[in-house]
Amino acid sequence: AQSVTQLDSQVPVFEEAPVELRCNYSSSVSVYLFWYVQYPNQGLQLLLKYLSGSTLVKGINGFEAEFNKSQTSFHLRKPSVHISDTAEYFCAVLTVGGGYQKVTFGTGTKLQVIP
Amino acid sequence: GAGVSQSPSNKVTEKGKDVELRCDPISGHTALYWYRQSLGQGLEFLIYFQGNSAPDKSGLPSDRFSAERTGGSVSTLTIQRTQQEDSAVYLCASSSNRGDEQFFGPGTRLTVL
């Protein structure tokens, strides 16, 4: 079984301040990790992903995330947020095996950037 | 097409009626997922198709929900005898067989009166 935990359902932050959105996962096998973003009234789109290699992953719009295997975390960070970053962010874990793939999403974190 | 498409974009129906939601995945993608996103909720997994294998139906909330995928491409999600709690945005996503990112459609907003 696998699970994803996003402890913060809402995160308010002032414009130009740094932000970290937390994601922890559990899995008995190797995982691939993703962050998706959903802007208001829009569909979900990929922000960044970790498949292998460097544990620090850079995505679109200045976001980055670091895969920490020992802490089973994949926290999302941005050093300086913009109003346009206001959106809901979803962490997801994917496992592959036996010809199947299983994806589990977290419950999402709403980032509200305050002017 | 260039991306995942879903139809209709909006559906309003009366309680007790059946509805069908359609998803056209990206050409060549072997994996197809259906999710439900209710107001203020996260993504609820419903069903997953992988090629010609038996689908993973473990997320379907009741036997009123069913889905099929014809020819390994287009998928239809059917909700029978709709209830008000079925009101939500139904999202479809597809991905390649490589265990990579999912590409989401714009969703179908279902409202059951």
Image (spheres, coloured by chain):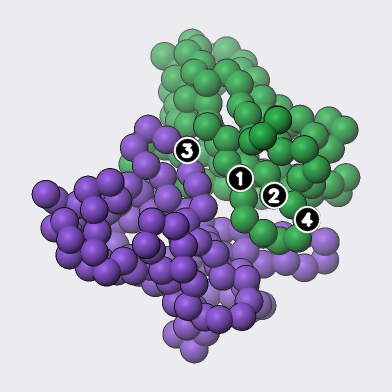
Chain colours: A purple, B green
Question: Which residue is found at the position 28% from the left and 46% from the top?
Answer: A84
In the image: residue B86, left or right of residue B69 = left
- Residue type at mark 2: give it: Ser
Q: Residue furthest bottom?
A: A70
- Residue type at mark 4: give it: Asn
- Residue type at mark 3: give it: Gly
Residue on which disc 2 sits: B95
- For residue A68, the mark is none
Residue on which disc 3 sits: A43
Labels 2 and 1: the sequence-earlier one: 2
Q: Chain of mark 1?
A: B
Question: Do marks 4 and 1 share a chain?
Answer: yes
Residue on which disc 1 sits: B103
Q: Are marks 4 and 2 in contact (CB under 8 Å)?
A: yes
In the picture, the quarter occupied by the N terminus of chain A is bottom right
Neighbour class for label 1 at 10 Å: few (<14), some, many (≥20)? many
Above or below residue B98? Residue B89 is above
Labels 4 and 1: the sequence-earlier one: 4
